[in-house]
Amino acid sequence: MPSALTALHSISRACLTPACWASASRPTSEVLPRSMSLREHGQYLFRSAVDVVLPARMLRRALELRTDGGPQLVVRGQAFPAQRNLYLVGFGKAVLGMAAAAEEILGDHLLRGVVSVPLGIEACLQQAGMQEMLLKPHSRIQVIEGAKHNLPDREALRAARAIGELAEGLTADDLLLVLISGGGSALLPAPKPPVLLEEKEKVTKLLASRGATIQELNIIRKALSLLKGGGLAQAAYPAQVLSLILSDVIGDPVDIIASGPTVANSHSTKDCFEILAKYNLLSSLPKSVETALHSSSSDSVRSQDYSHVYNVIIGSNSLALEEAKHQAEALGYLTLILSAAVCGEVNRVAKLYGLLIQFICLSMAGPGVDSLIDEVRSDLLQLAAELDIPSLNLTEFLRTLQGFGPERPVCLLAGGETTVQVQGSGQGGRNQELALRVGLELHKAKSTRAGGILDGWEVMFLSGGTDGQDGPTEAAGAFSSLELVDRAGQEGLEVEAFLSNNDSYTFFSKFQNGCHLLMTGLTGTNVMDIQAVLIRARDR
């Protein structure tokens, strides 16, 4: 059995593979040398954040089967009778591990289940040795894999039909346990007639390519679905419905996560047409989509009963950030969480991080740079006002940062989900594009008056998706640094050319043999993205 330190070295090799990420034993901060590279520290913090939101751990904290005085299923103090009347459905990137833990807890009280999970996840978890996230042999839960690259497909459609049929067959004596996580929208495609799967996918692809937020995407998805927007809860009526939800949406709105299959739809047809107009898509809608949207308007007039539904959030990005903060502090970092709700167009968010890094380095540089600090602060406050990131008090945040001295390294953590306006034909994802754009922002900063100060610091930026998949690529995200652009130029790689083609994955794959890619494989969980900034004084 390798030591934790040896294990960490093994997962930070130049060519990091999903198998070695998952199979290496989990190091602890007590044995993690502070002398290791910032990239190794960043990788460790990302892994710590992901580990704490692995589905089995969260589900066992939330769900309990009590057998004294008659079997009861207890969730957050709410009890439900359990008399071999339990059924289970699930959909999302974290659902396989959730289902494995649920079946272990429920035992013989579970009669049948169906889960829709990402293509290849069973093999990935098997290869990684993560047996606790796999169903046991002779499980009563049917697993259907689909939605390759997080896009709805025929297998996901087959899974949605099986889930709908199970729900429709329940009675008032039954209890349906619904497991929901991020990625659930693509894994539960049930287009509302006359819409075809391909037509629905076309509309969501167009919206995503033009920078629509996850909230906007899911409002449209709900209107075009039989099971989203409360449709699954209505199909299961009059059975009791208990939903355990792992949030991958800013603010944890249960009607948006996986497009709210067990929550009343709070959005109207008018909202849908306003979103489509915002992205100039009204003229390119398939006729079937227009028909379905208008039928959604008439459907919403009928009142629907949701008194049989109990929805509970069991995990979120904030939980992952708190664990990363705890581990960073144990490593000796002065650590702050910027926000768990970082959002906005990726180039604007990259500028925000570039300015924050400059502010931190200037603040720790000592006297004589007050005018530069004031200039950067002004730019930061203006940009933050434009981005309007929820729950971010930047003025107070900057005041805290300015009190930091150079004696200890600094760690800045954040979570959320950015958007990318796709204009090129390259391959990438929002995390890799963000990392590359931050590298470019830092390169530009070196040619300003702050450049001489920045040279005195080591800087690492990391952005990664907690699900292990950033866009239609094999990477979870990427690392960048102050030196990235210059070193890429020495290899003949022009960063701005790759960015103009939205080709960040190709860039990071070529640059230094891919060592700046964060490669985890599918993690089996999903609570949006994690970003980390690590800064320490260079050895002099």
Image: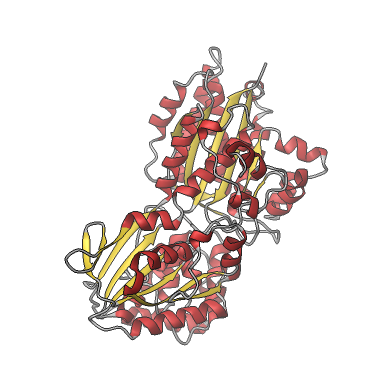
Quadrant for the N terminus, please. top right
Residue 378: % across, % down: 48, 30
Quadrant for the C terminus, please. top right
Residue 387: % across, % down: 46, 45
Q: Does 255 sit left or right of 74 as displayed?
A: right
Q: Which of 380 and 46 is in front in this view?
A: 46
Residue 304 visible (yes or no): yes
Residue 273 visible (yes or no): no
Among the 4 quarters of the image, the one containing residue 274: bottom left
Q: Does 300 sit left or right of 379 as displayed?
A: left
Residue located at (32% from left, 57% from top): 62
Q: Does 257 sit left or right of 345 as displayed?
A: left
Q: Would you place residue 496 above or below residue 454 in this image?
A: below
Residue located at (45% from left, 83% from top): 161
Residue 301: % across, % down: 27, 79
Q: Would you place residue 7 above or below residue 361 in this image?
A: below
Residue located at (37% from left, 58% from top): 59
Colour treatment of the image = secondary structure
Residue located at (20% from left, 63% from top): 68
Q: Would you place residue 298 above or below residue 219 in this image?
A: below
Residue 351: % across, % down: 57, 39
Q: Would you place residue 357 above or below residue 270 in this image?
A: above
